[in-house]
Amino acid sequence: MKRLSLSLLSICVLSFVLIYSCSTDEEPVAPVVQTPQYSLTVTAGEGGTVSTEGGIYDEGTELEITATPVEGYVFGGWLGTDLIFNTPTLNIAIYSNIDLEALFISENIINNDSEIFNYDVNKDYAEQIVDFYPFAFFASDLSQNVIDGVNLALKTAADEFGKYGPVEYWVFGTDKQASLDLINKFCERREILNQWTMTECLTRETDETADHSMIAYQKVGENAILNNRPSGSAAHNGGQYWGIHKMAHSYPFGFDNVFEGIPPQGDFKTVLHEYFHVVQLSSVYSLEQEEMDEAVKPNETIWMMEGGAEYMANYTLFKLINNGTLSFQKSWGSLKDKMSEKMENGKRIFLEDCPNSLLNEFNHQFCRQPGYDLGSWGVAYLLNKVNNQRVLLETFYPNLKELGFEGAFNLSFGYSTSEFYNEFYEFLKLPIEQQLEIIPDI
Ligand SMILES: [Zn+2]
């Protein structure tokens, strides 16, 4: 039966071609097994053209589509994909119906907004040293002290560690409406650059239950004040798809001296810590997420990532206080004091939870706090060994992408990581007075 239908169809088509006449009032033709086909529709928004309008394609067809802006416009992104693409040339394989729109941004919008965009939004700055500072955004309930404190800390970080950007540093207060307004500003920014739709952005960033959503940072600050318990949260939240470093910081109450005994230095240090993550990630920022993670946190080990950020932040803060560049009303002790606390805290948890583990076995799931505390000691140990407090900035991270973690480590410290991990395990057994000899006296 099927065969018959098929041959009827063939004849019909053949006749049609030959003599332009073909009766179709036969019984309906049974479906023919063939490669599924899908439709692709490509349109261009105002300000540019696309290389194809699409069509019907066999499943698995691979295509390259290019968006080209006309004069006065720049390419702004592809709308209609789940992923965020920011390159004008898109390589896709067809496995479903696809609707794409190329978006373009008028250069007038960008150029007239130098206050909001203190950099060239058309340029790809990944892994580059830039000539502009990080940019901070503040919820409207934050005080001038907070604004000045965070801005000074960011400028200090960029001056000390180098300028890598663009960095967007979003600072939240305790008031919910003020934070929603700030999130709105963030989402508008994404929309202007055609990186994310307003709706998707707001849905994600105002969801208190979503991981690292922006509103979650507001919640942390609100709870700290409500419960009269100092706690904060700050993070580098990616952004490489958009060509930025997206950062968030919960209410930095230290700058307002809200809690007795917690001066601004703690929040200043936190900004330096987060910015050091910018330096670390910038060295591999054009890699895919997995490769990037593997480069900075091989096998998920966090001691270099977190210990490096923590040690460099503390070292830099105390160095600048010590040489008179920074001054604060109240003392925050010395670098040796802070490192003593970290050794005590890190070692206590280490001995309780993971006494036989080496430094590289700590990760975000296992023995996390020692990863930070003893990790910072691991970094201090190495910097002292080569007598260069800037070796991470000058040698390790600049060579990480090219040589990989082990290679960059070898180049920077002259031996292998496994030799170091064993050596450091023994170092942990020394009395604190002897350990403190490697810490700069600042
Ligand atoms: Zn960190």
Image (cartoon, rainbow, N blue to C red):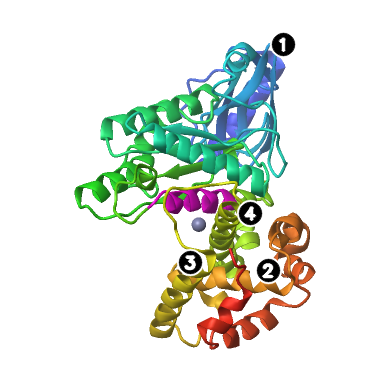
Q: Which residues are magenta?
A: 263-277
Q: Can you identify the residue that label 1 sits on?
A: 71
Amino acid beneath label 3: Lys
Instruction: Pinpoint residue 16: horizontal percent, then vertical percent.
Output: 65, 18
User: Is residue 265 highlighted in magenta?
Assistant: yes
Instruction: Pinpoint residue 12: horizontal percent, then vertical percent.
Output: 61, 24
Q: Are marks 2 and 3 in contact (CB under 8 Å)?
A: no
Dot label at residue 338: 3
Q: Are marks 1 and 4 in contact (CB under 8 Å)?
A: no
Instruction: Pinpoint residue 199: horizontal percent, then vertical percent.
Output: 38, 28
- Magenta segment's dominant SS is helix
Dot label at residue 280: 4
State whether residue 40 is above or below residue 145.
above
State whether residue 305 is above or below residue 99.
below
Occupied quadrant, residue 58: top right
- Sequence-first disc among 4 and 3: 4
Q: Can you identify the residue that label 2 sits on?
A: 383
Q: Residue at x 50, y 32 (%)?
A: 29
Secondary element at image label 3: helix
- Sequence-first disc among 1 and 3: 1
- Sequence-first disc among 1 and 4: 1
- Quarter in which the C terminus is drawn: bottom right
Q: Residue at x 58, y 56 (%)?
A: 322
